[in-house]
């Protein structure tokens, strides 16, 4: 809409900087979109993980991009994150259990544990935004921020490397 966004609560300086980087990238992909006009009441430091060595995790759906991230970063990962409600609808309990069992086996062989998050975020936002093009990456980031008090870094697998990015929600 091109309107400014004002946040009255304290916000992490890292999140604000990231929001501006994402806004710049999206504006380059969608010229009719305006860059983010964001003002915040005050900045905070990001939450620190409970442990002295920050735990790392990666989103893991069982797809090619997930396996590539596991291959590249597996020795750093403490957890793999499966989100029931993104690729599999929340109502599809049986299918989600089947996938979770398979992903648990992969995690057991690779070393990290599997964490499962269940959400209706996709079904809620589908009426307003296109999931693949605009929402999937934001939703993954929202889950990562939810887990920020426990995790120091969360990897979001991307379909393409930086020089080859194009409009896609996970980019």
Image (cartoon, rainbow, N blue to C red):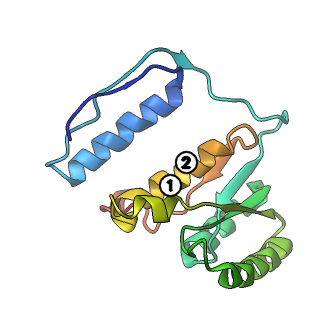
Inspect this view and state whether residue 171 appears: no
In the rendered picture of this protein, how many numbered marks are placed on residues?
A: 2
Q: Which residue is mark 2?
A: 142
Residue 116: x and y in percent read 73, 63
* Residue lying at 70% horizontally and 84% vertically, measured from the top left: 94
SS for dot 2: helix
Q: Nearer the viewer, residue 117 or 103?
A: 117
Identify the image quadrant of residue 39. Answer: top left
Give the distance between the C-alpha atoms of the residues marked 2 and 1, in whole angstroms: 5 Å
Question: Dots 2 and 1: beta carbons under 8 Å?
Answer: yes
Quadrant that contains the C terminus: bottom left
In the image, 102: left or right of 63?
right
Q: Which residue is mark 1?
A: 139
- Dot 1, crowdedness within 10 Å: few (<14), some or many (≥20)? many
Inspect this view and state whether residue 60 appears: yes
- Looking at the image, the residue that sits furthest to the left is 32
Identify the image quadrant of residue 21. Answer: top left
> Above or below — where is 14 with respect to 134?
above
* Residue lying at 58% horizontally and 78% vertically, measured from the top left: 63
- Looking at the image, the residue that sits furthest to the top is 42
In the image, 29: left or right of 133?
left
Quadrant that contains the N terminus: top left
Residue 43: x and y in percent read 52, 18
SS for dot 1: helix
Q: Nearer the viewer, residue 170 or 160?
A: 170
Residue 31: x and y in percent read 15, 49
> Above or below — where is 80 with respect to 20?
below
Identify the image quadrant of residue 150. Answer: top right
In the image, 94: left or right of 166?
right
Q: Nearer the viewer, residue 77 or 148?
A: 148
* Residue lying at 66% horizontally and 84% vertically, measured from the top left: 95
């Amino acid at each position: 809409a091109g309107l400014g966004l004002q946040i009255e609560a304290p916000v992490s300086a890292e999140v604000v900087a990231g929001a501006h980087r994402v806004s710049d990238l999206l504006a380059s992909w969608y010229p009719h979109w305006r860059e983010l006009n964001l003002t915040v009441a005050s900045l905070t430091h990001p939450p620190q993980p409970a442990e002295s060595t920050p735990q790392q995790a990666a989103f893991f759906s069982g797809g090619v991009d997930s396996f590539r991230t596991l291959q590249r970063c597996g020795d750093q990962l403490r957890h793999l994150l499966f989100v029931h409600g993104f690729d599999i609808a929340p109502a599809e309990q049986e299918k989600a259990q089947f996938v979770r069992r398979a992903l648990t086996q992969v995690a057991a062989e690779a070393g990290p544990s599997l964490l499962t998050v269940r959400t209706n975020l996709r079904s809620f936002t589908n009426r307003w935004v296109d999931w693949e093009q605009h929402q999937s990456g934001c939703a993954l980031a929202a889950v990562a921020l939810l887990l920020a008090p426990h995790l120091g870094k969360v990897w979001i697998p991307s379909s393409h490397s930086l020089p080859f990015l194009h409009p896609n929600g996970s980019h």
